[in-house]
Image: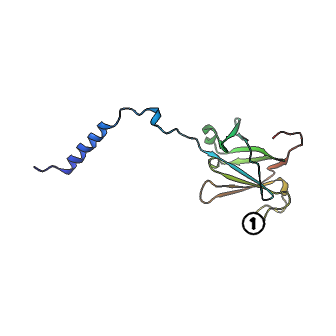
Amino acid sequence: MRFDTRVMHSVFFALLLCSLPENVSSENTVPIRLPCFTVHVRLNGKSIDAPDVITVRTKDKDTTVSSKDGCLTVPSELLAGKAVDVFFTVPGSRIYLTKISPSFLDAPCDVDLEDKKFGAKSRLPKHARVKEACEVLFHGGEPEIELLQTGCRSPLRDNATK
């Protein structure tokens, strides 16, 4: 007696499906995690404290995001737009990055600040004020995206809070 292999495979697949549980409990599911990112800040080439809180501004509203275990998770509804503004404070400075693609907010980024002069590889315009500029490197893909903004950094007053 010969059996057709296609029939045997179909029977095996049907038996396999019948042996699966009818519904999967929530204990067995993997929670969906929103993308998060970290911000690493250097001043004059030396690491300084990263922000514990950032504010993400869309056309409609400002949303404050707090760091949890070093990770900043931006609500998904803010990631749907074309661009957002991100601002935060670090020791001595307020940083305001404008028109950032929300897709950049799911991977680490480095923010470089200088008081006197950026390195030789910097593309900072000659007329720009170094103390007011930010070089940002987003590590979310290949190639990494480098952003240079002038006017993104302002000094904090002594009585301003972090």
Residue 32 pos. (x, y %): 53, 39
Counting every numbered tag in the picture gives: 1
Q: Quadrant of residue 69?
A: top right
Identified at 78% across, 59% down, the residue is 45
Mark 1 packing: few (<14 Cα in 10 Å), some, or many (20+)? few
Residue furthest bottom as drawn:
120
Residue 109 pos. (x, y %): 68, 52
Identified at 23% across, 43% down, the residue is 11
Q: Is residue 58 visible?
A: no
Identified at 78% across, 61% down, the residue is 124
Q: Is residue 135 left or right of residue 130?
A: left
152 and 73: which is toward the camera: 73
Q: Is residue 111 visible?
A: yes
Q: Amino acid at mark 1?
A: Lys
Q: Quadrant of residue 10?
A: top left
Element type at marker 1?
Answer: loop
Q: Is residue 72 left or right of residue 157?
A: left
Residue furthest right as drawn:
158
123 and 106: which is toward the camera: 106
Residue identifier under label 1 = 121
Display colour scheme: rainbow
134 and 66: which is toward the camera: 66
> Which of the image's four quarters has the C terminus?
top right
Residue 87 pos. (x, y %): 75, 44
Residue 158 pos. (x, y %): 89, 42
Image height check: is 126 above or below 162?
below
Identified at 81% across, 50% down, the residue is 153
Q: Is residue 59 left or right of residue 11?
A: right
Image height check: is 56 above or below 2?
above
